[in-house]
């Protein structure tokens, strides 16, 4: 019987918890991300859409043998650069995560898809299927606040890893973790390190009986 995967969200944040509006230390972020050696990288459509202009002209070394699977929550069918993602050299393959109400996909599209939920992708069902059908033991979430908030609200995260940057973000707008949980949740600190350039890496797990 396959176990549900361990799900960790590793996120670069500013002092106010924002995930955008500042320049994260990408080298350090990805160095630390290697800690979990994930089977699946789980991300959201808006994170991919933010990269699509760059992706369209980026080198395409091909899929990475032995690399993780990239699974993208795309409930509204907005992502288009599936081939570029597959060939970006980071992932062994890509998987489109849709809902039953996701608009019809382009004819001839080759990306494999998993359909769960009606109006939105059912994140819990996705994680179960990643374990059962794809043998995932570890899923690392690489996303901004919307997907993080939804996963936290549904108590689907086993760990939250914060790379805190000593800055405040620029600009305006709601960049924070967005869920609509009605009760506060508690977490236990399971590790913390001070790194160069004022960065702090802190890891938390949901507190028992929170
Ligand atoms: N600081 C970091 O570590 C970090 C990491 C990654 C990305 N980012 C940045 O974050 C920004 C994007 O963040 P974002 O928060 O706007 O987008 P996001 O993380 O990509 O999350 C949006 C995705 O979550 C899905 N979603 C949200 N709530 C859901 C729910 N309740 N059920 C099912 N699916 C749900 C949305 O579904 P639909 O498809 O249905 O809309 C959408 O696909 C980008 O600028 C990116 O560069 C920062």
Image (tube, helix red, strand yellow):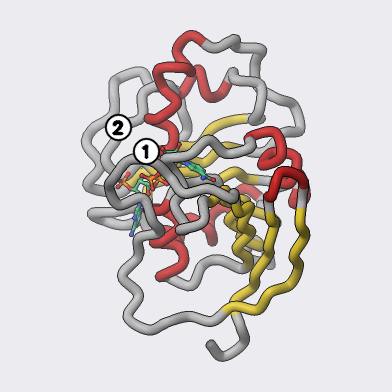
Q: Which residue carries the number 1 mark?
A: 46
Cα separation, mark 1 vs mark 2, equals 9 Å
Give the side of residue 178 with respect to residue 57, left or right: left
Residue visible at 48% across and 39% down in the picture? 22
Q: Nearer the viewer, residue 107 or 188?
A: 188
Residue 58 position by quadrant: top right
Q: Which label was assigned to residue 152?
A: none
User: Where residue 86 appears, x then y in whole percent?
Assistant: 56, 23
Q: Residues within 10 Å of mark 2 (few under 14, many from 20)?
A: some
Q: Secondary structure at mark 2?
A: loop
Q: Secondary structure at mark 1?
A: helix
Q: Is residue 9 above or below residue 209?
A: above
Residue 132 in sight in this render: no
Give yes or no for contact between labels 1 and 2 (Cβ–Cβ under 8 Å): no
> Disc 1, ligand 1: is the CB inside 8 Å?
yes
Give the side of residue 196 with respect to residue 58, left or right: right
User: Where residue 117 appears, x then y in whole percent?
Assistant: 32, 57
């Amino acid at each position: 019987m396959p176990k549900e995967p361990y799900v960790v969200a590793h996120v670069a944040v500013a002092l106010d918890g924002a995930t955008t509006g500042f320049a994260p230390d990408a080298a350090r972020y990805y160095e630390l991300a290697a800690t979990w050696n994930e089977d699946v990288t789980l991300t959201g459509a808006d994170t991919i859409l933010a990269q699509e202009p760059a992706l369209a002209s980026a080198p395409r070394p091909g899929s990475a043998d032995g690399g993780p699977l990239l699974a993208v929550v795309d409930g509204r069918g907005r992502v288009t650069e599936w081939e570029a993602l597959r060939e970006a050299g980071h992932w062994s393959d890509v998987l489109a995560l849709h809902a039953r109400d996701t608009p019809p996909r382009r004819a001839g599209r080759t990306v494999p898809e998993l359909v769960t939920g009606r109006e939105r992708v059912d994140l819990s069902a996705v994680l179960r299927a990643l374990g059962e059908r794809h043998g995932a033991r570890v899923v690392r979430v690489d996303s901004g606040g919307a997907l993080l908030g939804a996963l936290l609200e549904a108590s689907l995260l086993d760990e939250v890893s914060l790379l805190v940057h000593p800055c405040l973000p620029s600009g305006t707008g709601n960049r924070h973790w967005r869920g609509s949980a009605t009760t506060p949740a508690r977490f236990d600190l399971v590790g913390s390190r001070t790194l160069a350039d004022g960065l702090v890496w802190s890891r938390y797990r949901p507190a028992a009986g929170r």
